[in-house]
Amino acid sequence: ETKPRIPVLWMHGLECTCCSESFIRSGHPLAKDVILSMISLDYDDTLMAAAGHQAEAIVKETIEKYDGNFILAVEGNPPLNQEGMSCIIGGRPFLEQLKEAADHCKAIISWGSCASWGCVQAARPNPTQATPIHKVPGLPAKPIIKVPGCPPIAEVMTAVIAYILTFERFPELDLQGRPKMFYSQRIHDKCYRRPHFDAGQFVEHFDDEGARKGYCLYKVGCKGPTTYNACSTVRWNGGLSFPIQAGHPCIGCSEDGFWDKGSFYNRL
Ligand code: SF4
Ligand code: SF4
Ligand code: F3S
């Protein structure tokens, strides 16, 4: 409570804004408490009151005032083709804005699968050359934490922020740069339908008897066995449910290249 609130610049590249939509629904801690009491969200063009030139001036001001001491949170990614012209913020390529902020930040959070892996806009043939943050050429070697998912779970997003603020360091990361506490297990490892998988009881079609009985969704394309995320433990909407509980296979939305890997309903 006595710590100064750490400044955060939350930037948006090519994305759909559902990572923000997820974030604002966090129940533990409440997103409003994160924004009003834990961090100083100096810039986020989706959530801030300022707009236009006034908003862009805040980026410059924050970079100058907190040089080396602010967190750069990135939702989405920059397109590299045509010098970044497919994503313009305040009259110039997002790529420029990103590089400038990355040069002066303390660390980077890559929100969601767009920033972490590329996601839909980087799917083949990727005409704009959309590129995940850790692969953008010319970015300084700053610590990057990936929080993948399309979108990530709200409470995972706010927990990552709470951890960084409490311990003044990143949580332990896996080899791909994801926090181990949320991404070290597969959906399949803690799925409540797992006993049906083990017993060989599968949904063959979405409207069959097996579907009504809640059998395993592996044969209708579930990517739970190859997807690392916390959905089967933390769940969504305050722990209420997750895709498999709603009767839909996991589409592997937190995995690298999930759009190109076998489509939603086919096995890899
Ligand atoms: Fe939207 Fe998914 Fe990208 Fe988040 S990761 S901005 S939810 S497309
Ligand atoms: Fe595994 Fe998916 Fe079956 Fe759950 S529904 S047990 S995650 S294959
Ligand atoms: Fe995504 Fe699979 Fe969870 S589709 S939301 S990782 S259950």
Image: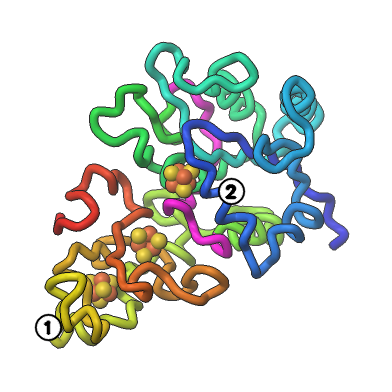
Range of the magenta residues?
Answer: 137-156
Residue pointed to by mark 1:
200
Residue 243, quarter of picture: bottom left
Along the line of sight, the residue nearer the viewer: 206 or 163: 206
- Tell me the residue at 54%/43% (across/down): 17
Q: Residues within 10 Å of mark 2 (few under 14, many from 20)?
A: many
The answer to whether 209 appears left or right of 110 in the picture is left
Amino acid identity at mark 1: Gly
Question: Which of the four quarters of the rendered structure image does ligand 2 lie in?
Answer: bottom left
SS of the residue at dot 2?
helix
Place of residue 179 in the rendered image (x, y in percent of width and height, measured from the top left): 48, 58
- State the predominant SS element of the stretch in magenta: loop
Q: Residue at x 31, y 57 (%)?
A: 252
In the rendered image, the residue lying farthest to the front is 207
Q: Quadrant of residue 232?
A: bottom left
Query: Where does the image place residue 205, in percent across and percent down from the top left?
Result: 15, 71
Question: With respect to residue 15, does 53 lie above or below?
Answer: above
Q: Which residue in the protein does label 2 denote?
A: 20
Q: Is residue 226 magenta?
A: no
Q: Is mark 2 within 8 Å of ligand 1?
A: yes
Q: Quadrant of the N terminus?
A: bottom right
Q: Is 240 on the left or on the right of 97, as rendered?
A: left
Q: Is residue 145 magenta?
A: yes
Q: Amino acid at mark 2?
A: Ser
Name the secondary structure under disc 1: loop
Where, by quadrant of the figure, is residue 154 drawn? Answer: bottom right
The correct choice, above or below, for 178 with respect to 204 in the image is above
Task: Say which residue appears at 47% left-offset and 15% top-offset.
Answer: 85
